[in-house]
Image (spheres, helix red, strand yellow):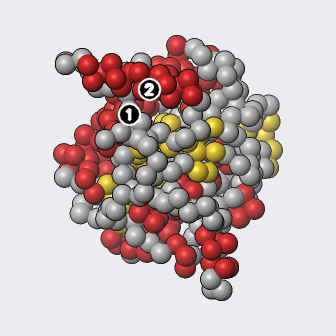
Amino acid sequence: MTKRIGCWIPLLVVAALWVSHAAAQQAAAAPAAPPQLRSLRAPIPAPPIQHVLLIGWDGVQRHHLLELLVAGKLPNLARLIDEGSFETIGVSGHTTDTKSGWAQILTGYDPDVTGVYSNRQYQPIPEGLSIFERVEKAFGTDKVFSAAVTGKAQHVGSLGPGLRKEGAAQEETMRPGQPFHLTRKALDVWEGDKVREADEVGEPALKHIRSTEGKRLFAFVHFSDPDHKGHAFGENSPEYEQAIVKCDEWLGKLVELLRSMGIYDSTGVYVVTDHGFDEGAKSHAYAPRSWLATNDKAVTSGGHMRDIALTILVRLGIDVSKLEPAYDGRPLVDMDPFPLRRARAGAGS
């Protein structure tokens, strides 16, 4: 059986993945091969997932990621894809930066709903719209353990309005509340609002996941290293590559913990990025080619960044058609080309 990678990957990269897979099959004791390709097919019937581990690799360019997969440098991500799929994700409706990217991923809504348009134009996401709050409302706050551990400060921040130094100029001015200022109150654990490297994110994430205590787990673990190294050294630098490899190492540790807890088979693991990176540059001024890697066999198509939250909610068994405001996206578990809002309007509901 072959695995499918989203159909818009450049042909040369697709060919390389096929060649690499064939070579791996011929080698008796070869290390884990890069993820195989899967042809377009009907969705796989799959029961709803019970737990969610959403992992953010900040600022990871899709092409660079695929090169590392082909080279066998991301074995944990490759194993995850072999269980599920790798899908191409597009960015539209906002700039390719951190605030707007994670706001859309963690809500499923465009900036006209969240108020988060870019790193410079933002507001706190309105209460009740985050995927954390949706899950807790659906299953009960006493039955869900929700946690977020992040590696950035202001762009994935939760501070309220006030005088702060932000941006390149670092001038102290009155700033609005950060995107997750209202969201954090709904979580059992919010450990963020500071810049830290992968080890400083991964270790507390392991600790918090261990404390799930029989509840549904919904955890967001955000690694900022690739974005920081890209800005400092450039997208084609050894430092940028090593930061991605470090993220893969932590993916392996997190998956191993889920296995040891006996909940991996009922957990949807979704690895995503908020934006890509300009080729060979230290910026992501126009980097809309994102991606999603998952162990979830029900995910069968690529789409847009707004579709990720919707996909997770649907896989948890939540009836998203009843949620307001209506979503413009679509779950990636089928090939339905129509957004839910349009489908609902057509049904007269």
Does the CB distance between marks 1 and 2 fall below 8 Å? yes
Q: Secondary structure at mark 1?
A: loop
Q: Residue at x 33, y 61 (%)?
A: 46
Residue 248 location (% of width, % of height): 39, 30
Residues 307 and 273: in front is 307
The residue that disc 2 covers is: 17
Residue at 50% x, 29% y: name it: 14
The image position of residue 314, as x and y in percent, is: 45, 66
Residue that sits furthest to the top in the current view: 238
- Secondary structure at badge 2 equals helix
Residue type for callout 1: Gln
Badge 1 crowding class, 10 Å Cα cut-off, few under 14, some 14 to 19, many 20 or more, is many
> Whole-Å distance between the Cαs marked 1 and 2?
7 Å
Residue 261 at x, y = what percent? 20, 50
Give whichever of discs 1 and 2 has the lower sequence position. Answer: 2
Residue drawn at x 19%, y 45% as measured from the top left: 260
Q: Is residue 234 left or right of residue 189?
A: right
Q: Mark 1 highlights which residue?
A: 36
Q: Position of residue 166 (x, y in %)?
A: 73, 39
Name the kind of residue labelled 2 in the image.
Leu
Q: Taking the image as drawn, is residue 249 in sight?
A: no
